[in-house]
Image (spheres, rainbow, N blue to C red):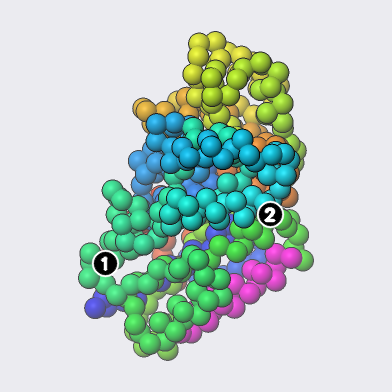
Amino acid sequence: MSDKVRVFVFVDALGWEQVERYGFLRDLLPNRRKIEMQFGYSCTAIPTILTGERPAAHGHLAFYDYAPAKSPFGAMRFLAPFLRPRSFWRRGRVRNVLSRLVKRLYGFTGYFQLYGVPVERLPMLDYCEKTDLFVPGGMAPFKNIADVWRDQGLRYHVSNWHLPEAENFRVAAELFRRGAVDRAFVYSAAFDALQHDNVGRDEVLRPKVEKYAETIRGLHAALVAGGRPFELTVFSDHGMTPLRGTADAPAALAKTGLVWGSDYASAIDSTMARFWWLKDGAEGKVRAALAALPGRWLSEDEMRRHGIWREDHKFGDAIFLADVGVQFVPSDMGVKPLNGMHGFAPDDKDSQACWLSTEPVPESVTRVCDYFMVMSAR
């Protein structure tokens, strides 16, 4: 048994700006630091948090990559011709139902969503989150935090991300009151969705933040009742940046006359467009077409600094990043902009994450990838 219980509460999208604006748990968690977000989205940050590895190693930058030889969706080529009209199959509710069917068909245990990806392109795309990342072996060949705590012989608890956050908080509090765990990773994802729709609306966000404060005070009380010394840390992966404009990348690409899957391939997310060059001449035309859009091409040095450069170009031969606050609409994520988004340059002030703790913050903890070192320490 470990002498001290160590609890880590991960609140997705609880950014440094919100923490400071609302004075979130300043008395209970006085040791605080602004944290540089991991380049990418939650699907990038969560594997980074769980393993301490950066995307170049763990392979998760965005959900979809161009990889015909590795695509699990080969059978979809026979279904795609029947999904007409396209406008119907791009509706949100329809896509959600289709996503559930595809997930069951392929036996994916991780988070899966088709979003706005054209179904006819799926046989040329790979998906990164086929397995549940949070369970032992979920990030193989890398060890995730569940693997580490198990190997250390600790009694541990990792929240079930399939459950509502209220249930996950309730389960954790009961374990703490009984003194039944040495380590805990408590996960809450609901604030991310709320921020996407309501960023900047204090009348909506403040009550939710206050509810989190009340709930975490309850976790603290449960730890006290458990009778063992403990430390409690709350952290996040990013904040949320208000919508400031949109850019139509597909329209710009259409003017080139290039054919997707023959001349080039792309994965257009909300804030970045990734490209693979399949024929000579395609790169120059695409770069010229996007020159008028509000954004810039990342250099190799930047990609290395952000931990997303790979020699095999899994994440793309080139990446075009939107200016802060600009969303690509339409994109492979959907046909409408959201009120808030993350996934911009890591130095965007609205995107900064937070680390809040009852214990002093180690000097080495400045980026999201640094969390693992603290969580895995004996």
x 56%, y 71%: residue = 164
Residue 150 bears which disc, if any?
A: 1
Q: Earlier in the sequence, mark 2 or mark 1?
A: 2
x 31%, y 57%: residue = 137
**3D distance between C-alphas at marks 2 and 1:** 39 Å
Residue 326 locus on image (x, y percent): 69, 38
Q: Residues within 10 Å of mark 2 (few under 14, many from 20)?
A: few
Q: Residues within 10 Å of mark 1 (few under 14, many from 20)?
A: few
Relative to residue 118, is residue 2 depicted above or below?
Answer: below
Single out the mark in the foreground, 2 or 1: 2
Relative to residue 15, is residue 4 depicted above or below?
Answer: below
Magenta-colored span: 204-222
Helix, strand or loop under label 1: helix
Residue 321 locus on image (x, y percent): 59, 32
Amino acid type at mark 2: Arg
Q: Is residue 218 magenta?
A: yes
Residue 196 locus on image (x, y percent): 67, 54
Residue that badge 2 annotates: 93
Amino acid type at mark 1: Arg
**In the displayed structure image, the side of residue 306 where residue 241 appears, left or right:** right
Residue situated in front as seen by the camera: 232 or 81: 81
